[in-house]
Image: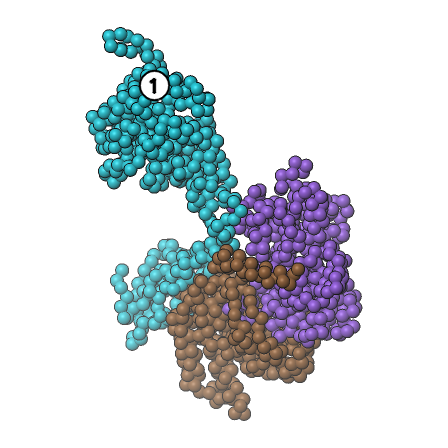
Chain colours: A purple, B cyan, C brown
């Protein structure tokens, strides 16, 4: 399995190159298109426009408009077509511009992609990959700022991943393509410009493992997607005051790698779960409950969670900032969890 | 109703939908004697959702109605009996008059009820043995152990993965015998009064089941006082012997000499114990009582008994009583000291058969020879199980104690 | 001529097979042997018979929840369908789907879809795959009711189908009522072929009670699609003689209207014509009914006797663990070696903590070498 444990703060070495998350994903897509004729990309503005986040830029020139296929604004239609194409022997990568628009395709994803294998009694595989973005932070207001990956993580029959590093962006895609199940890849919008080391020879990465990004002793912070860099920054700050935080990148939202989380929490005896989605009924709740079930006897404090406040994401910058967990919030929560008098 | 025979068959209330449980015949469209054919409508049925005409699937002659108009009947209940047309066999596969077919979904429902819900609940279990010296215990158990003065590490854990739960702590604190505590004493309660409840239950049981007899004897402690004063004169406070230790020692020696009072009543007979383990009742500051034992008190010197007693009291007050101290006592002593009562009219702690009590020491007029003098007097008492002993033995037992305390060099 | 007569006899026999099967299902449902929802095709048999008879083994079929007839004529064994509705392990969907979710991968029968209009984008995708993989002789036949034409997914699918020129035959079975809602009250434009044509898809309307009309129209459409043609749309005007489902008192239809349509029963009218033309005689027709009864009855007996799946394997078929072997684009049948399925990772209850910890240790050791 590929080398994806290196933290985002490490610099490139001899065996790695430094890429942005965007560049890494583009490389992954390029390799996929080049290596397998059955692979094609389909989504809104993926061709000439280059993709709304410029991930697919240049690909249509090399691979043509059939294989980098622009779709009309028909999320349900083209996601369903992706399912059908997968049934028919292709390996489609469907790009849904953002998770906000994925709601239009929920019927296809939840009622069809997730259920076909089961309803057919094990006959029909749906080797579909869906890429979509999630998260807030750019003042795009309530309809363009959701973090709904938790909704998809709720559904049996789907695999859901959230690569949070360029290395994972590069190497989780090939694994997703090779997987016979529908895989949804959530890319946080704030990560595209992040730089990080990518080993060009690493090979396909695990889809269902969490990874410890930073070792620590006093508490375990569990994060995914856009929360990961914030968690690492918070951990640096905490270290300055003698609090050693272990940071785990969840990576796989369904299935959740509970053994990795539990092994850590049994040792640190404290857990803090970070979620950019809302607190109520969010994925943070599932992670917290799972950790509590597995680690109850060794917990020294209730499992803490930090998530977005119960408000549609506002436009004004200071309000948006206040609505979403920030580094300061993480530091405060960690301190309070550890019982730091300065908290 | 008569059973169907080879020329008749029944037509049952049909299921018309996933959520139809029963129906009511509003109107018959046929009458006995009518010939009906497959597809004919035989009745108008009222259901929760609507009124529907129901059809019959086989040809036949209506014989009799099996239910009345207006009756609410469950799906699958036969509602009309028909005769086959001449020469035709009754329809094969006609369902037997039961509500649901065999091997149907309902049968499976019972099987399924706890299957995977339980499975996913413990999708990842903690390993059985913990590492790192931390006793796995629930927060509630920790709090209870602190209240009762028990050391968690000594407790047996019955929770998942061997963790200590509330019930384990309660069981340890009230268990005072070899036999398993009754379910009442180990049932987990979540109130702060749990110890009180446990004690209440034990006392109620004891009173109910043990035929007590009570004997008392007043003791002149003058000699003991003098003896103690002399022995303690050169000792630091921490090493001084208290009367309580002498009482325990006296009871232990007496119990060794009168084995009928040192043991257990179980299964309808008395089992003498092979050692004299004296339990000392210690009251806790926050209320409640614990009775840790001093093992082989008859084989230890008074000094050793005193030091054991000191250790027990300290442990009880600091919440670090060992579980091993809480079980296996063969006789119990209650010494109320100066708290106020003259006489302990005790209740035995089953399955023991005796409890020895000492009230407060008080200055009393005493006859010595022909003179009346003032002496320190304590009333000793014996509560004994009449199934195991009679008053004579009890009486002799108290006499032995009196002698020992009167000649303390023997202790 | 002879071939035509053979075809006609086959078309009649197929309609009769469906009719007998469906009637028996109604009875079995009343007896609580079939549960859940049951949607019968009685009255509409000419459409399935006419269309399915034109399809080839390499074609794909997508249908709605009123699909027993389509599945039967596609070649899914009656026993397999009946067992599925009895919830037995030997059902075509392993008992996991029921009446509304009949699947058979080998026959390229992709359900059995219960979200109205939900499978239309799938048809587009199947057609797209054929287009992209150069499989020019393959057509996807997609059946749906006129009610689906109100759903957004219909419109998105039509648009994409035309845009991408996918080889799909869209078969609208217009039985005039979407559950209890009449076409007139749900469509601002009730000329359905016109609606489809507005997406630049050739579309026309056919008498769905006349099996020969259905067959002819379908042959023509398929001829245009095969070999590189784009999508086509046919509206089949038909009628269901029974209510939407078992629990439907059918209050929204005028009994006279139902009676009028029953006069146009596709089976009796076609049989009558064939007898009049001397293609069959009454005995031969009766033999078809008997053969259908035998087929259905054997299916019922087999379904009754079939076992149910053990609840121990409840969590199977959620996620497939192994990567399917031998994925050659032309390989349509699922290879048996890919049958390795396990309960979903992470929710397995039989993995002990020790196993997991050991696996983690091993994995961690292994990973340590890779990740410095």
Q: Name above or below for residue C316 compared with residue A320.
A: below
Disc 1 crowd, CA 10 A, few/some/many (<14, 14-19, 20+): some
For the C terminus of chain C, the image quarter is bottom right
Q: Is residue C147 visible?
A: no
Q: Is residue C1 visible?
A: yes
User: Secondary structure under badge 1?
Assistant: helix
Say which residue label 1 marks: B224
Query: Looking at the image, which is closer to me, A199 or C176?
Result: A199
Counting the numbered discs, the total is: 1
Q: Position of residue A75 (x, y in %)?
A: 68, 64
Residue at x 27%, y 21% (from the top left corner) = B403
Q: Position of residue C24 (x, y in %)?
A: 43, 71
Q: Position of residue A23 (x, y in %)?
A: 76, 64
Query: Looking at the image, which is closer to me, A6 or B123?
Result: A6
Residue at x 34%, y 72% (from the top left corner) = B92
Q: Residue furthest front?
A: B234
Q: Residue furthest top?
A: B371
Residue at x 33%, y 27% (from the top left corner) = B249
Residue A193 is left or right of residue C248, and the answer is right
Residue A240 is left or right of residue C149, and the answer is right
Residue A146 is left or right of residue B135, and the answer is right
For the N terminus of chain C, the image quarter is bottom right
Residue at x 68%, y 55% (from the top left corner) = A225
Query: Looking at the image, which is closer to me, C199 or A211?
Result: A211
Query: Looking at the image, which is closer to me, C11 or B371?
Result: B371
């Amino acid at each position: 399995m590929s080398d994806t444990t290196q933290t985002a703060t490490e610099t490139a070495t001899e065996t790695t190159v430094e890429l942005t998350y965007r560049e890494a994903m583009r490389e992954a897509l390029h390799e996929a298109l080049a290596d397998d004729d059955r692979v094609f990309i389909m989504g809104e503005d993926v061709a000439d426009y280059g993709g709304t986040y410029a991930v697919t830029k240049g690909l249509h020139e090399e691979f043509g408009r059939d294989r980098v296929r622009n779709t009309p604004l028909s999320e349900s239609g083209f996601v369903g077509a992706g399912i059908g194409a997968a049934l028919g022997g292709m390996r489609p990568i469907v790009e849904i511009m953002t998770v906000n628009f994925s709601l239009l395709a929920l019927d296809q994803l939840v009622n069809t992609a997730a259920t076909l294998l089961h309803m057919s009694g094990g006959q029909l595989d749906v080797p579909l990959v869906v890429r979509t973005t999630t998260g807030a932070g750019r003042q795009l207001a309530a309809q363009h700022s959701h973090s709904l990956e938790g909704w998809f993580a709720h559904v049996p029959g789907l695999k859901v991943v959230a690569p949070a590093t360029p290395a994972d962006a590069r190497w989780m895609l090939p694994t997703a393509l090779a997987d016979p199940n529908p895989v949804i890849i959530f890319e946080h919008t704030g990560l595209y410009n992040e730089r990080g080391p990518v080993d060009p020879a690493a090979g396909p990465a695990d889809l269902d493992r969490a990874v410890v990004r930073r070792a620590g002793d006093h508490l375990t912070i569990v994060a995914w997607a856009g929360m990961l860099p914030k968690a690492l920054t918070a951990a640096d700050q905490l270290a300055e005051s003698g609090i050693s935080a272990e940071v785990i990148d969840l990576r796989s939202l369904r299935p959740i790698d509970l053994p990795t989380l539990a092994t850590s929490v049994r040792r640190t005896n404290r857990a803090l779960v970070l979620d950019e989605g809302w607190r109520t009924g969010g994925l943070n709740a599932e992670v917290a409950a799972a950790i509590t079930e597995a680690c109850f006897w060794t917990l020294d404090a209730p499992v803490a969670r930090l998530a977005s406040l119960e408000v549609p994401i506002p436009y004004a910058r200071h309000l948006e900032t206040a609505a979403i967990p920030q580094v300061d919030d993480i530091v405060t929560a960690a301190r309070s969890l550890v019982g730091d008098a300065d908290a | 109703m008569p059973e169907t025979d080879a020329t008749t068959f029944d037509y049952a209330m049909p299921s018309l939908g996933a959520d139809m449980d029963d129906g009511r015949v509003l109107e018959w469209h046929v009458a006995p004697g009518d010939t009906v054919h497959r597809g004919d409508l035989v009745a108008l049925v009222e259901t929760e959702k609507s009124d529907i005409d129901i059809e019959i699937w086989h040809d036949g002659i209506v014989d009799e109605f099996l239910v009345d108009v207006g009756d609410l009947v469950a799906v699958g209940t036969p509602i009309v009996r028909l005769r086959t047309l001449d020469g035709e066999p009754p329809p094969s596969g006609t369902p037997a008059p039961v509500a649901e077919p065999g091997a149907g979904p309902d049968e499976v429902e019972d099987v399924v009820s706890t299957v995977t819900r339980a499975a996913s609940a413990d999708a990842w279990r903690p390993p059985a043995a913990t590492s790192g010296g931390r006793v796995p215990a629930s927060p509630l158990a920790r709090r209870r152990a602190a209240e009762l003065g028990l050391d968690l590490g000594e407790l047996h854990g019955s929770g998942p993965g061997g963790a200590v739960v509330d019930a384990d702590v309660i069981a340890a604190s009230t268990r005072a015998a070899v036999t398993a505590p009754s379910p009442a004493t180990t049932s987990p309660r979540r109130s702060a009064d749990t110890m009180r409840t446990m004690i209440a239950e034990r006392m109620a049981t004891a009173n109910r089941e043990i035929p007590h007899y009570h004997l008392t004897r007043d003791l002149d402690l003058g000699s003991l006082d003098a003896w103690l004063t002399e022995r303690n004169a050169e000792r630091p406070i921490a090493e001084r012997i208290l009367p309580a230790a002498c009482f325990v020692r006296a009871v232990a020696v007496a119990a060794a000499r009168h084995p009928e009072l040192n043991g257990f009543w179980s299964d309808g007979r008395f089992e003498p114990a092979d050692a004299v383990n004296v339990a000392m009742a210690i009251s806790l500051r926050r209320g409640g009582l614990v009775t840790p034992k001093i093992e082989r008190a008859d084989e230890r010197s008074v000094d050793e008994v005193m030091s054991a007693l000191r250790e027990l009291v300290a442990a009880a007050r600091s919440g670090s009583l060992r579980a091993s101290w809480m079980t296996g006592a063969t006789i119990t002593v209650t010494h109320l000291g100066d708290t106020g009562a003259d006489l302990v009219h005790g209740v035995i702690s089953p399955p023991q058969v005796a409890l020895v009590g000492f009230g407060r020491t008080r200055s009393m007029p005493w006859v010595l020879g022909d003179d009346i003098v003032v002496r320190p007097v304590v009333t000793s008492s014996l509560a004994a199980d009449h199934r195991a002993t009679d008053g004579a033995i009890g009486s002799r037992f108290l006499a032995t104690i009196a002698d020992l305390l009167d000649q303390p060099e023997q202790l | 001529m002879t071939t035509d007569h053979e075809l006609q006899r086959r078309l009649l026999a197929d309609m009769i097979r469906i009719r007998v099967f469906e009637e028996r299902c109604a009875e079995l449902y009343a007896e609580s042997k079939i549960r859940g929802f049951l949607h019968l095709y009685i009255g509409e048999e000419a459409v399935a018979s006419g269309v399915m008879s034109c399809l080839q083994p390499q074609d794909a079929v997508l249908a709605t929840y009123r699909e027993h007839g389509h599945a039967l004529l596609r070649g899914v064994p009656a026993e397999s369908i009946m067992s599925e509705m009895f919830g037995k392990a030997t059902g075509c969907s392993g008992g996991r789907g029921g009446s509304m979710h009949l699947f058979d991968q080998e026959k390229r029968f992709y359900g059995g879809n219960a979200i109205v209009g939900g499978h239309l984008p799938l048809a587009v995708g199947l057609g797209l795959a054929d287009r992209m993989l150069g499989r020019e002789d393959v057509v996807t036949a997609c059946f749906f009711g006129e009610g689906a034409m109100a759903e957004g997914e219909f419109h998105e699918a039509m648009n994409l189908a035309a845009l991408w020129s996918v080889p799909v035959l869209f078969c609208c079975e217009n039985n005039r009522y979407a559950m209890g809602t009449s076409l007139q009250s749900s469509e601002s434009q009730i000329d359905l072929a016109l609606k489809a044509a507005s997406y630049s898809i050739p579309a026309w309307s056919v008498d769905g009670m006349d099996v020969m009309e259905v067959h002819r129209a379908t042959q023509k459409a398929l001829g245009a699609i095969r070999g590189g043609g784009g999508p086509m749309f046919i509206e089949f005007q038909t009628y269901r003689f029974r209510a939407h489902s078992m629990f439907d008192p059918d209050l929204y239809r005028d009994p006279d209207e139902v009676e009028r349509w029953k006069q146009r029963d596709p089976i009796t009218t076609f049989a009558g014509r064939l007898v009049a033309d001397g293609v069959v005689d009454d005995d031969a027709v009766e033999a078809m009914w008997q053969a259908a009864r035998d087929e259905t009855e054997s299916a019922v007996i087999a379904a009754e006797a079939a076992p149910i799946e053990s609840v121990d394997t409840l969590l199977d078929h959620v996620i497939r663990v192994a990567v399917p072997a031998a994925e050659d684009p032309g390989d349509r049948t699922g290879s048996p070696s890919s049958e390795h399925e396990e309960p979903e990772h992470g929710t397995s209850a039989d993995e002990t903590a020790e196993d997991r910890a050991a696996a983690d240790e091993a994995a961690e050791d292994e990973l340590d070498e890779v990740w410095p």
